[in-house]
Amino acid sequence: MSKLAPIAGTVVAATGAAHFVAPQAFASINQAAFPQNTGEWIKRNGATELALGLGLLSRRTRKLAAVGLVAYSAFLGSRVAANRKG
């Protein structure tokens, strides 16, 4: 994981930053997960991904950031699933 973590961290952090540069690119997934206040959630998710990605870049915070990324992914997936049911 030590060689993959900096690459993954860079990708996750860049994706998080992209939420602020091109929010329309993230509108559909955020709409599926958060039908109310989608614009606000785009920013929240961008900030979360940016922080988690930066966390993966440092050896001191890598394990915590990896756990956070798994939890964050599960949270988003559960939100999409909950909103598909009705």
Image (spheres, helix red, strand yellow):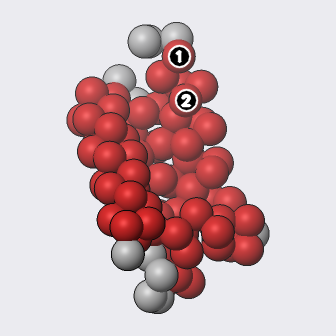
* Residue neighbourhood size for the residue with mark 1, other residues' Cα within 10 Å, grouped as few (<14), some (14–19), many (≥20): few
Residue drawn 44% across the image and 88% down it: 36
- Quadrant placement of the N terminus: top left
Residue drawn 44% across the image and 76% down it: 34
Picture coordinates of residue 70, whole percent (x, y): 32, 38
Q: Is residue 65 visible in this depiction of the protein? A: no
| Amino acid type indicated by mark 1 | Leu
Q: Is residue 52 visible in this depiction of the protein? A: yes
* Residue extending farthest bottom: 37
- Is 82 situated above or below 58? below
Picture coordinates of residue 65, whole percent (x, y): 32, 38
- For mark 1, what is the residue? 4
Q: Could you say which is closer to the camera, residue 12 or residue 26?
A: 26
- Between the C-alphas of marks 1 and 2, the distance is 6 Å
Is residue 66 toward the left or the right of residue 33 in the image? left
- Quadrant placement of the C terminus: bottom left
| Amino acid type indicated by mark 2 | Ala
SS at mark 2 in the image? helix
Picture coordinates of residue 6, whole percent (x, y): 53, 25
- For mark 2, what is the residue? 8
SS at mark 1 in the image? helix
* Residue neighbourhood size for the residue with mark 2, other residues' Cα within 10 Å, grouped as few (<14), some (14–19), many (≥20): some
Contact between marks 1 and 2 (CB within 8 A): the answer is: yes
